[in-house]
Every structure is written in structure tokens, then in C-alpha cells.
Image: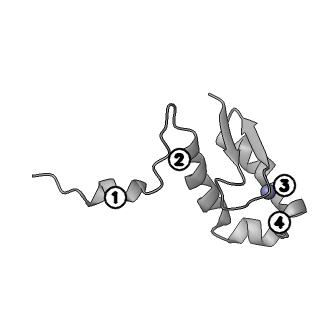
Amino acid sequence: MAMTITCADMGYSCGYGITGESMDQILSGIKHHSLEFHDYTEEELTNSDAVEQWKGALRQSSRPGDTRTPRDESDRNIVPH
Ligand SMILES: [Zn+2]
């Protein structure tokens, strides 16, 4: 299943977007892009939370027919009876 993520999804405003068949493929594309355009270093990309944030953004943006609810966590506060 193809997934798409844009820099806007990740909090940037550069208008870049990438589509791939797997999360790994997209993440490697994002890494390349971030190294060149967002002043990340290899070390930052390996050790920081940035990649986790991108994965979260990917999961949000890859939902089919999604209405893009920005605050997904609110669901988790609902306690079942
Ligand atoms: Zn970008």
C-alpha cells in the first residue's frame, strides 16, 4: 500500500512530499531530504526523536479516507465501562 508524507505533516513548510510502498522506503527518503534541506546531521537522524515523530506523522497521514484529526490521543482518554 502506497503511503505519502509531506513536510507539512512533519511540521515543516517547505512543500516537499514523498510517496513510497513502505515506511522504511519513505523514512529513508525523508532522511535524505532532511539532511539536504533541514540541516539535520546523520547523527541527529540516528539518535533523535525525529524519526519517531515522522513515523507518527506517517501513520496519521496514511490512513485511508482520513479526515485528519490532529488530536488522536483524545480517544485514549475514554475509559470503557
Ligand atoms: Zn522539507
Mark 1 to mark 3 CA distance (whole Å):
32 Å
Relative vertical location of residue 81 with respect to residue 21 in this rendering, above or below: below
Q: Which mark is residue 38?
A: 4
Amino acid type indicated by mark 2:
Gln
Splitting the image into four quadrants, where does ligand 1 fall? bottom right
Of the two numbered discs 4 and 1 on the same chain, state the one appearing first in sequence.
4
Label whose residue precedes the other's in the sequence (4 or 3): 3
- The residue drawn where x is 72% and y is 61% is 12
Other residues around mark 3 within 10 Å, as few (<14) / some (14–19) / many (≥20): some
Residue type highlighted by circle 1: Ser
SS at mark 3? helix
Residue 27 place in picture, x, y as percent: 72, 49
The image quarter in which residue 24 lies: top right
Q: Spatial distance from mark 3 to mark 2, Cα to Cα?
A: 20 Å
Q: Give residue 14's mark.
A: none
Tell me the distance, in whole angstroms, between the alpha carbons under discs 2 and 1. Answer: 14 Å
